[in-house]
Each structure stands twice: as structure tokens, then as C-alpha cells.
Image: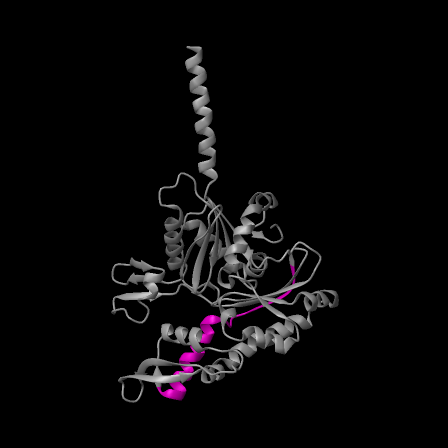
Amino acid sequence: MLNNRRTYIEKLNKYMKVGKKMIGFGLNIGIDLGTSSVLVFVKGKGIVLQEPSVIAIDKNTNQILAVGEEARRMLGRTPGNIVAIKPLKDGVISDYDITEKMLKYFIHKTIGRKLFFKPKIIVCVPSGVTEVEKRAVIDATNEAGAKVTYLIEEPIASAIGAGIDIAQPNGHMIVDIGGGTTDIAVISLGGIVVNTSIKIAGDRFDEAIVRYMRKSHNVMIGERTAENIKINIGSAYAREEQVSMGVRGRNLVSGLPVNIEVKSEEILGALEESVSSIADAVHSVLERTPPELAADIANHGIFMAGGGTLLWGFDKLIEKRTGIAVHIAQNAISCVANGTGAALDSMDMLERSGSNRLEARA
């Protein structure tokens, strides 16, 4: 009888240990809630999801038809009763209900629908968001299934993801160019010293290309075509060798489909105003940086991250305008998500602080 009881207790302890591991495993999540795409980082697994921030809905029934990549393929190709929506604009929530549904879908896709314990989630937000916009992100994430939601500013997450030791008393400049916003910050001792956030980024580049094609070629193109042009022949700095690609769109005069050849120097001109605004913002932040930190930045260089950074020659443009070496972070697109993942290790410290923001705790 005693041996049976001892065996029972040993088995119970074993199951309790396994249960504790199951409770903690995968239930801390970092989300890079971007205007163009959503990346989800699960502690212990890394980045497990990367999909466009798009959701397709039937207007008649209010039923979700597709989310992510499947919904992105529907942009510009839906009948009257179906609408493909980007619920985030300029880095913040523009449609609360749709954002909540999208987050719920991605969370369930990541960790399953049948959860005994809700996850703790850290979400990245641009450094310039208002308190109202922060509250909207927290509420939407909680409604989507989070036990508790914390916020981390994108420059901090981006710097961590780029491998910068932000806790040291050294100045580092990070330029994060996303889909909706560009965040520029000087970081020292784990905090932001000087920063700015402008609503000029990858989506604005696409809009500029659409306008150029309409004005210069009398051709209407869609968002996806503009993005392909940006990726393939877009430039922020003059190329030594010009490249070109065929673009198909609708002629505004005849109303018929046409195929034209577009050169990279044309797109350079189309994007000049937008990329110059970002370069001006970098220059402005440097002007407001304390001298000691400015000297550190001159020694370490400027770090760039985010999908918009991959526009050809952007690093060359910033380097020419500032006279400071520029480094593009490895895995620039997933840099913020990786930084959020690193911040998950400081969740306990964050809880003790009672704050809804994670600053210098990675």
C-alpha cells in the first residue's frame, strides 16, 4: 500500500513538472504589428509567422474570407461584395474591429485555438504614437486573446534585433523604415535620447510610383504592381548601370491593357521626394543629438532596419547626406520581431515594474 502511494506521488510530481513546462512553453509571444506585414515571435521557437497585414471580408455577411497572404492576393481583384482591407495605416490602427479579428486569427494560427492559458504578448509600436493609439493596440490585442499586453517602441526592438547592446553608455542611431512609418532614434543606456517618427515609408513609396505612372505614362497600376516595381528596379541613389522591367497596366486614354518598359532612373525620380524626406529627418535627429553621443554615432555608424531599408542605394544616400558610415542590419525585415523576441526574456522584470511599455530591459 505504501509503495503504491509512493509510486503514485512520484508519477504525480512527474506530471506536474511536465505540466509546468507545457504551461510556460510557447505562451510568451512577441508581435511586430506592422502596416504592411505582421511577424509573430514565439519564445523558444523564433519567428513562426510572417504574413501581410490584410484581411478579406464579405460585406453582406461580415464573414472573414481570408487573412494574410491569401487576402493580399485579392487586393484589387475582388467583386463588389468582397473587400480586402489593410486595417493599419501609418503604423497605427485605422479599423479597430478588423485589427482585432486579424490578430485573433494570427494568434490562433500560431499557438492553436484550444488554450487553457492565454498568452502574454509584447507588441511593437512606432515611437511617435499617442496614448490613445497605444490604448487601441493594447485593447485590440487583449480582445484577440492575450492575458496581458505590453508595448515596446520599435526603435528599441529594432536596435536589440540588430545586435546592438543598448544598455551600454554609448550612443547608437537606428533608422527603422517600415511600411507605414520611419522611426529614427538615438539610444543610450537602454533609453531613447532623441527621436522622431515620420509617416513616410514603404507604402508612401508605392503611392509615389502609382502617381508617377499615371502622370508620366498615362497608365494606371495597382498597389501590388507598384510594390514589384519598387523591389525590382526602385532606387534611392543613382545606379551605375540602369535596369528596367516590363510593367502591365491600364491605359487611361484608351482604357485598354498595355505593357510598357520602365527604367530605374524613372523610379529614382519618382521616389526622390520621399527618400529625401527620410534623409532630412535623419539629419534633423543628428542635429539634436548631444555632442558625446554624436561622436559615438560617428564611430559606430548608423544602423538601418526594416523592409524599406532594402530599397536599392538607401544606405548610400544616408551615408552621403551625413558623412557617417551606414550599416544595414542582417535580416532587416525581421529585425523588429527578433528584438521583440529578445525582450520576452525580460517579461518578469516588466511585470514587476507595473509598466505597459518595455524600455531598457533586454
Residue 35: say if magenta: no
Residue 65 at x, y percent in the picture: 28, 59
Residue lying at the far front of the rendered structure:
241
Residue 195: say if magenta: yes
Q: Which color scheme does this rendered protein use?
A: one colour
In this figure, what is the number of numbered marks? 0
Q: Nearer the viewer, residue 346 or 82?
A: 346
Residue 171 at x, y percent in the picture: 68, 62
Q: Quadrant of residue 60?
A: bottom left
Rendered residue at 49%/59% (across/down): 334
164 on left or right of 217? right
Residue 164 sits above or below residue 108 on the image: below
Rendered residue at 74%/68% (across/down): 291
Residue 81 at x, y percent in the picture: 25, 66
Rendered residue at 53%/77% (across/down): 275
Residue lying at the far top of the rendered structure:
1
The N terminus lies in quadrant: top left
168 on left or right of 34? right
Residue 320 sits above or below residue 134 on the image: below
Q: Which residues are magenta?
A: 192-218
Residue 164 at x, y percent in the picture: 62, 58
355 on left or right of 201? right
Residue 119 sits above or below residue 208 on the image: above
Q: Quadrant of residue 280?
A: bottom right
